Image (cartoon, rainbow, N blue to C red):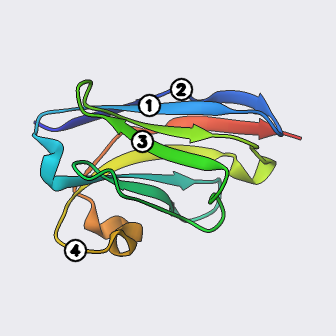
Amino acid sequence: QVQLVESGGGLVQAGGSLRLSCAASGRTFSSYAMGWFRQAPGKEREFVAVISWSAGSTYYADSVKGRFTISRDGAKNTAYLQMNSLKPEDTAVYYCATAPLTYYSLSFYTDEYEYDYWGQGTQVTVSS
């Protein structure tokens, strides 16, 4: 059974940094992508970033490009989201999810319906 467990959320001041982790188990992830999404109160869940597990290719939402970095550690089966220069509008519950790699371009993985397993989420709150 696939399990994804996020950690690392918390309260931080604007301009600060946080690193989220997503510990994955239950499958071999070499043929999968790992994505991060977020959902703010009253808003729909939105794409943040995605990484191809084997190749390490990445793709970001414009709103976080240059501030967030997605990475993975194959030995630990863990994906990370390093978030720098945080803004109050980054406040949300952050989720990691996996998707089978069926498309050549990671730009197709901005759609949450491409993902088959999700973690429970971790809260990130950025104060002004």
Q: Are marks 2 and 1 in contact (CB under 8 Å)?
A: yes
Which element type, helix, strand or loop, lies under badge 4?
A: loop
Which element type, helix, strand or loop, lies under badge 1?
A: strand
Q: How dense is the environment of label 1, judged by Cα within 10 Å: few (below 14), some, or many (20 and up)?
A: many
Kindly identify which residue carries mark 2: 8
Kindly identify the residue that appears in the image at 75 percent across and 54 percent down: 89
Comes first in the chain, label 3 or label 4: 3
Three-letter code, disc 2: Gly
Q: Nearer the viewer, mark 4 or mark 1?
A: 4
Kindly identify which residue carries mark 4: 103
Kindly identify which residue carries mark 1: 21
Task: Tell me the distance, in whole angstroms, between the alpha carbons under discs 3 and 4.
Answer: 20 Å
Task: Tell me the distance, in whole angstroms, between the alpha carbons under discs 2 and 1.
Answer: 6 Å
Quarter of the image where the N terminus is located: top left
Task: Tell me the distance, in whole angstroms, between the alpha carbons under discs 4 and 1.
Answer: 25 Å
Three-letter code, disc 4: Tyr
Three-letter code, disc 1: Ser
Res 111 visible: no
Which element type, helix, strand or loop, lies under badge 3?
A: strand
Comes first in the chain, label 3 or label 2: 2
Kindly identify which residue carries mark 3: 71
Comes first in the chain, label 4 or label 1: 1
Comes first in the chain, label 3 or label 1: 1
Three-letter code, disc 3: Ser
Res 128 visible: yes
Comes first in the chain, label 2 or label 1: 2
